[in-house]
Amino acid sequence: MARDVNLNADMGEGYGAFAVGDDAALLKIVRSASIACGFHAGDFMTMRDIVGRAVRGGVSIGAHPGFNDLWGFGRRRIDMSPSEVESLTAYQIGALQGIAANAGTKVTHVKPHGALSNMAAEREDYALAIGRAIKTIDRDMIYVAQAGTKMQTAAETLGLTVAREGFCDRTYEDDGALTSRKIAGSVLQDPEEVTRRVVDMVLNERIVARSGKSLSIRVDTICVHGDEPSAVAVARSVRAGLEAAGIRVVPLTEMALG
Amino acid sequence: MARDVNLNADMGEGYGAFAVGDDAALLKIVRSASIACGFHAGDFMTMRDIVGRAVRGGVSIGAHPGFNDLWGFGRRRIDMSPSEVESLTAYQIGALQGIAANAGTKVTHVKPHGALSNMAAEREDYALAIGRAIKTIDRDMIYVAQAGTKMQTAAETLGLTVAREGFCDRTYEDDGALTSRKIAGSVLQDPEEVTRRVVDMVLNERIVARSGKSLSIRVDTICVHGDEPSAVAVARSVRAGLEAAGIRVVPLTEMALG
Amino acid sequence: MARDVNLNADMGEGYGAFAVGDDAALLKIVRSASIACGFHAGDFMTMRDIVGRAVRGGVSIGAHPGFNDLWGFGRRRIDMSPSEVESLTAYQIGALQGIAANAGTKVTHVKPHGALSNMAAEREDYALAIGRAIKTIDRDMIYVAQAGTKMQTAAETLGLTVAREGFCDRTYEDDGALTSRKIAGSVLQDPEEVTRRVVDMVLNERIVARSGKSLSIRVDTICVHGDEPSAVAVARSVRAGLEAAGIRVVPLTEMALG
Amino acid sequence: MARDVNLNADMGEGYGAFAVGDDAALLKIVRSASIACGFHAGDFMTMRDIVGRAVRGGVSIGAHPGFNDLWGFGRRRIDMSPSEVESLTAYQIGALQGIAANAGTKVTHVKPHGALSNMAAEREDYALAIGRAIKTIDRDMIYVAQAGTKMQTAAETLGLTVAREGFCDRTYEDDGALTSRKIAGSVLQDPEEVTRRVVDMVLNERIVARSGKSLSIRVDTICVHGDEPSAVAVARSVRAGLEAAGIRVVPLTEMALG
């Protein structure tokens, strides 16, 4: 039986006149777009543009909420209360829903960004706060969670549909966490190496950590980072590699998720 | 037959640690709240707080979108394209819907703020852009429009339910426009004078302009401005005055609107 | 021999249309103003207004730099590198110098705000980074440092003039740190109690901690917080109490500092 | 006798994680840098980085103040009062001075950005407000003014040193104003065409307008825009073309200005 997997990318991470990444090219390769919602990056016009392109390309749409820290691009850990995290997430999901409705489409997944995602991977209260925002707004939205983290268990606790995410261009630590971006070599840029890792991750359910240790991992979706210069080449290679291995690359909305 | 009217106030116009107005007191007097959505003022926590209080008080909820100009409090005219106005409005409506859904309630009206409202009163393209944002997101939402302006006709053109708004604490020019806030005396603060004007406006469908000229006006809702120090006393007096004149003060959602 | 002390307040902590505190009243009581510089609060017009009033009132002027976190009012701890702290501080000092020069006056002290101040009190690298910004811009500016903290020693290490600061309206922990604002009762609002504590602090060089323990403290300047509703009454009482005890209240620029 | 001219570029027009232009390459070609100061773009770290590179490269430094409109990149006309323009300019000049002092150097010119520049070219009150900010902060700073506009006459009225600026990559209207960026073809990107125009401008003191009409223009400095993809190739060609024509390209601080 054919195995399906989703390929997603973070998009719309510019702001006003500032552009980041080649979203138009990525939208022809990935099948789901996680769109910045105006807090760590993104704005109403960027969002509108990406949503329109995604609809035309058959790419499913998700919110990519982050901390309210434009200067820090949502990568700085900021201590907020869980109720602040819940409202911050609800605001951003709703904002994208407004833009999506205006373009005649729907938001079908939510994937936290940067430091918010990393903190929610570790902290159950954050992971649940994000999950409650999803559940109260539209319980059919998919919670995209770093595989094997508190986000995944929070989604399960709340009875939400979860997509377990693996990162193709980031190295892992032995405990399954992503290596910090501050450490040299944590972002992989060689398309062949990345593709080999991804196919291994999907077919064999494992990833080799930075230490060389083999970790068990089950993923439904693979993230390509839109803000790296190598993103388009990497994404193209990964998609071709997956298809060559007999794996179908589909939108999140077409995955059979738990 | 008893005449109904709505009393609405702009709320949640603080930002983070900055507080503006006594929203808790106003929420016991008015029946509809127009809530700032994070662009000219407001933030996810302020919005969450007001929405929760409104639900408990039987006050209906609306979005109060403005220009993306926090420093200028949305009062500076900025030349945006109609498509920018449409997306800016859709974003803000959606953001409040996210907060409202998270609190278990719904957004039932939209009322533009400040310079955006004043420009939409004059410019059909702006008034229609706001209307399209409303229509595509939830065509049952009420478009609160300055009575007799392009906003009212745009709502009618688009087939939206419109609530015609009068201002109780602002003076009018002979052409029906609000006197600019820059002109001394344009904001009325004496509760008795304001109440007399409001009852006259509702019962006799007229307002006396700054020049002394009597203007014809039909209103469904009266706005009390939350950011004036006198707002609470004025609102209390207006509500008592309306009820003493046999007029029922109801939420926008209970008005029979065209 | 008469003892001198300075009384300072944080000012200009509004933003655009958002006002905080009664700065005009405080400027008639305190002798030095620490002015927000646009990052945690403050903007070019607020700064210009306070600087003008300070000049007319014989009040000396200082920069009050904070984290770039308007929503959080600079009260959220954010992990920045020391070189980021140095540039962030240099920018804000310079900005106030620009406003001050435009008004024909000078910036004579620097006092960090909120979480930046609390982190610099604990971390030598932050305290030194702030000190280097001061030293490279104008080595005659006074470094206002929480008494007994890393800020005081950093100022001494760099050969800067330091003013040791005590807080009249905040409780202290046994280790000399301020009690977190999150703890109930950490901000004192009774003018008589505060005044008694201040006179004791200046004359007897001690403060009684929250636990009841008596701590030794030597201060050159006392801070009144401008953002509390009770600030004006407290400041007036403190100044009267100090003068009744024979203590002169002078600008920082007239203090004999080490 | 050899003719001198300055070549300047707008720099540091990114924000946080958002990068714009190849400033490092441009700094090897131009002799003066006009640095964004945090309002329309730029931040304390970007400014610090550019200032350090400029010092090492013998490039003179100027402030590039703009409207407080990050989303609009300072290109939207916003109606501010002259006193707001004066304080907004003073703040930004001071901020860069703080960063420059921290790096051991000085700010030697001021050049307004975008809509602020275009409005000051037309409005004497804006041009004078900017001039007063310069004069009160450091009257030796050079006011870089669009040649033949109100900015030039304001600088002369205030007795400031002025550098008359020409644009190499923008087309002109018959009245000497720049063609709006909204009009196709208003930004020239062909290095040869641009170079020919610049040499003609410097040697023959004329520019050919979009209509074909020849305009008289005297310039001391030529602007290369850093935010266009073609900026580096254009700047390199312009510099080589000027030098091939026997014109020395020097920092603003080495020009003999009126």
Image: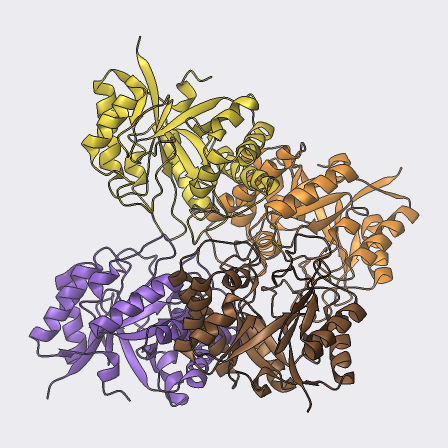
Chain colours: A purple, B brown, C orange, D yellow
Q: Examine the image and state in which quarter residue B185 appears.
A: bottom right
Q: Position of residue D256 (x, y in %)?
A: 42, 15
Q: Is residue A205 visible?
A: no
Q: Position of residue A241 (x, y in %)?
A: 10, 70
D185 to the left or right of B85: left
The correct choice, above or below, for A155 with respect to B86 in the image is: below
In the image, farthest residue toward the top: D1
Q: Position of residue D63 (x, y in %)?
A: 47, 35
C204 to the left or right of C44: right
Picture quarter with the N terminus of chain D: top left
Q: Is residue A62 visible?
A: yes
Q: Position of residue D130 (x, y in %)?
A: 54, 34
Q: Examine the image and state in which quarter residue B28 appears.
A: bottom right
The correct choice, above or below, for C210 with respect to B2 in the image is: above
Nearest the camera: A210 or B85? B85
Q: Residue at x 80, y 43 (%)?
A: C5
D225 to the left or right of D115: left
Nearest the camera: D61 or D182? D182
Nearest the camera: C118 or A54? A54
Q: Residue at x 78, y 70 (%)?
A: B191
The correct choice, above or below, for B30 with respect to D212 in the image is: below
